[in-house]
Amino acid sequence: MEIFGIDFGCAYGSLVNGQIPEKECLLPLLSKILGYCIVAASTTVKLPQILKILKHGSVRGLSVISFELEVVGYTIALAYCLHKQMPFSAYGELAFLLIQAIILVAVIYYYSQPTGIKAWIRPLLYCAVAPTILAGQIDPVLFEALYASQHAIFFVARIPQIWKNFRSKSTGELSFLTFFMNFAGGLVRVFTSIQEKAPTSVLMGSILGIVLNGTLLSQILVYQTPPAKDTKKTN
């Protein structure tokens, strides 16, 4: 019994016989289900962040370079998983995250102060190179090196935002819900990566994401506490 690539036969057979499915049967099944849950949830991960910017008409406190590098990281990660022909349940969220990340950067550009022609060099360069990377039309050795670098890219992408939050003691328009979903998704992805026997580099990427998103999540909780009201009476 197979539905959407998920084999329910083992678990179904055990339940029909009045038995609890064994771990060797249950864990792979759970991994597949959770993998598709992550893919489904990823379709709205960045929506709260986008809506928050649109609602306030502001990108206050947001680091543009952080979100730009995030697009680059998602592009490389998605291309690598496609090239390795990994199960869709193991990486599907990357496709939806990439699309949303591009939309988010476009919204940030719209609400940012005009920065001149130089600001368009990065997006134009991305549009020129991204299709080649996604198609896997580069040297295999270079592809492996590029994928190895995407962990550093995600790390560097988060640091400017983390540092900006720390310096200003504010997280501006950062969305708690978006980073909470990123953090929770990373926890689940570690489990599914182990079960799907994904490359070690993929697993390490998920762990790195947990640490960085967890840091940003904690900053949102700490720095977005409403300031205490002034109780002093004026004469």
Image (cartoon, rainbow, N blue to C red):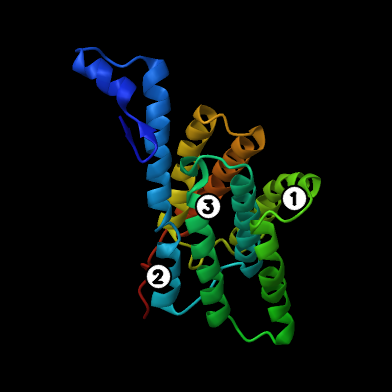
Q: Nearer the viewer, residue 38 or 110?
A: 38
User: At 40% from the left edge and 43% from the top edge, which residue is drawn?
Assistant: 36
Q: Secondary structure at mark 2?
A: helix
Amino acid type shown at disc 1? Leu
Q: Which residue is mark 3?
A: 94
Q: Is 162 positioned to the left or the right of 141 in the image?
A: left
Residue 104, x across and y down, in percent: 51, 69
The part of the image, by quadrant, that contains residue 52 is bottom left
Determine which of the numbered discs, if any, sits on residue 33 in the image: none
| Mark nearer the N terminus (1 vs 3) | 3
Residue 58, x across and y down, in percent: 49, 77
Amino acid type shown at disc 2? Leu
Q: Secondary structure at mark 3?
A: helix
User: At 61% from the left edge and 39% from the top edge, which residue is drawn?
Assistant: 202
Q: CA distance from mark 1 to mark 2?
A: 32 Å
Between circles 1 and 2, the one closer to the viewer is: 1
Between circles 2 and 3, the one closer to the viewer is: 3
Q: Nearer the viewer, residue 114 or 219?
A: 114
Q: Secondary structure at mark 1?
A: helix
Q: Which residue is mark 1?
A: 146
Q: Is 36 positioned to the left or the right of 155 in the image?
A: left
